[in-house]
């Protein structure tokens, strides 16, 4: 039988080795300790210890004892792990992330636990956002409602933060095989393929290419692809109109500026080629005459 009072005293020892030993003993004897509430509080205290080695060991211990906690203690333990993933230390982050994945199977309210990570994915701290999305990627196979997972990740792909958009869209390739409704996947990706984020568009396009032949109505899908192509061309055209507006005022006055731009391009392109060819010919003729004149001077 472990001496709980002795373990408790070690929690407050100035010697980090004694605090580390306390974490080990709490992990080993947790079920046999009579005052479980006190033992749990001591373990949480060690999870925020100033010494990194102690924190990592306490985090591992919390993972081990998690199934033995009461529902209210599991909620406290989950929140402690959420705090730990805020750290920028890779060793502590790894221990916390693995503990979260294990603990997720035992939390009473999985939906709320999932939401707690979604909220962190919009944190103002870049590292916290990345760690939260990383944890969501690790956890999603354990989430019962995969359609909810897909909806959340496609929403994250529209985040205000570029790093969240990138991580979330990279996860599409992992998540979509869990879903059966290819038409629904296509529709959500079609919307994302029209966003201005190049990375999101590319990842959405990757999955669209993979599922195209699995769609029941491929003609409609092809029309979607054509519309997206025109949409991107339209965006390029609007940028071009803005840049060329000073040189071609008729663009800003046209009823359909993009159409006018295409007309001007078709009209000007042959002239530009002819002008370039003409200039090139004149340069060659001038160069030939110059060489002839130089030869006469040498003679």
Image (cartoon, rainbow, N blue to C red):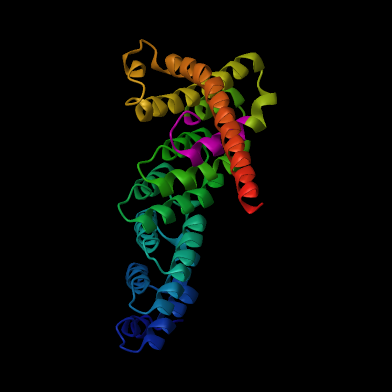
* Residue 260 seen anywhere in this rendered image of the structure: yes
Quarter assignment of residue 221: top right
Q: Look at the picture and state if 273 lies above or below 154.
A: above
Measuring from the top left, give residue 180's x and y in whole percent. Answer: 62, 29
Q: Look at the picture and state if 155 lies above or below 102.
A: above
Measuring from the top left, give residue 99's x and y in whole percent. Answer: 48, 61
Q: Look at the picture and state if 6 lies above or below 37.
A: below
- Magenta segment's dominant SS is helix
Q: Is residue 184 left or right of residue 55?
A: right
Task: Magenta stretch: give its range.
Answer: 192-208
* Residue 108 seen anywhere in this rendered image of the structure: no
The residue at 57%/24% (across/down) is 274
Q: Is residue 245 left or right of residue 296?
A: left
Q: Look at the picture and state if 175 lies above or below 268.
A: below
- Reply yes or no: does residue 139 show up in magenta: no
Q: Is residue 228 left or right of residue 49?
A: right
Please name whichever residue, 28 or 49, is drawn nearer the observer in this view of the structure. 49
- Reply yes or no: does residue 205 show up in magenta: yes
Measuring from the top left, give residue 54's x and y in whole percent. Answer: 41, 78
Measuring from the top left, give residue 184's x and y in whole percent. Answer: 55, 24
Please name whichever residue, 180 or 265, is drawn nearer the observer in this view of the structure. 265
The residue at 48%/31% (across/down) is 192
The residue at 42%/60% (across/down) is 69
């Amino acid at each position: 039988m472990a001496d709980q009072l002795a373990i408790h005293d070690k929690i407050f020892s100035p010697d980090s080795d004694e605090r580390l030993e306390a974490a080990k003993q709490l992990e080993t004897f947790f079920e046999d300790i009579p005052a479980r509430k006190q033992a749990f509080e001591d373990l949480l205290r060690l999870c925020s210890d100033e010494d990194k080695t102690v924190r990592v060991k306490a985090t591992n211990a919390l993972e081990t004892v998690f199934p033995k906690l009461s529902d209210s203690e599991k909620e406290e333990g989950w929140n402690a792990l959420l705090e730990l993933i805020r750290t920028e230390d890779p060793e502590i982050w790894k221990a916390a992330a693995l503990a979260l994945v294990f603990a997720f199977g035992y939390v009473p309210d999985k939906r709320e636990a999932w939401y707690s990570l979604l909220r962190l994915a919009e944190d103002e701290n870049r590292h916290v956002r990345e760690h939260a999305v990383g944890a969501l990627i690790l956890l999603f196979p354990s989430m019962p409602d995969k359609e909810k997972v897909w909806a959340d990740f496609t929403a994250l792909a529209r985040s205000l933060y570029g790093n969240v958009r990138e991580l979330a869209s990279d996860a599409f390739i992992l998540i979509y095989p869990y879903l059966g409704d290819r038409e629904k996947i296509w529709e959500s990706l079609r919307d994302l393929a029209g966003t201005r984020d190049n990375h999101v568009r590319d990842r959405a396009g990757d999955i669209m290419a993979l599922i195209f032949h699995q769609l029941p109505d491929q003609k409609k899908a092809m029309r979607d692809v054509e519309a997206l192509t025109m949409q991107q061309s339209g965006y390029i055209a609007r940028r071009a109109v803005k840049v060329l507006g000073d040189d071609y005022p008729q663009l800003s006055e046209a009823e359909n500026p993009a159409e006018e731009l295409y007309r001007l391009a078709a009209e000007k392109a042959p002239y530009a080629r002819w002008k370039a060819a003409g200039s090139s010919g004149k340069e060659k003729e001038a160069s030939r005459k110059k060489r002839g004149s130089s030869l006469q001077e040498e003679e």
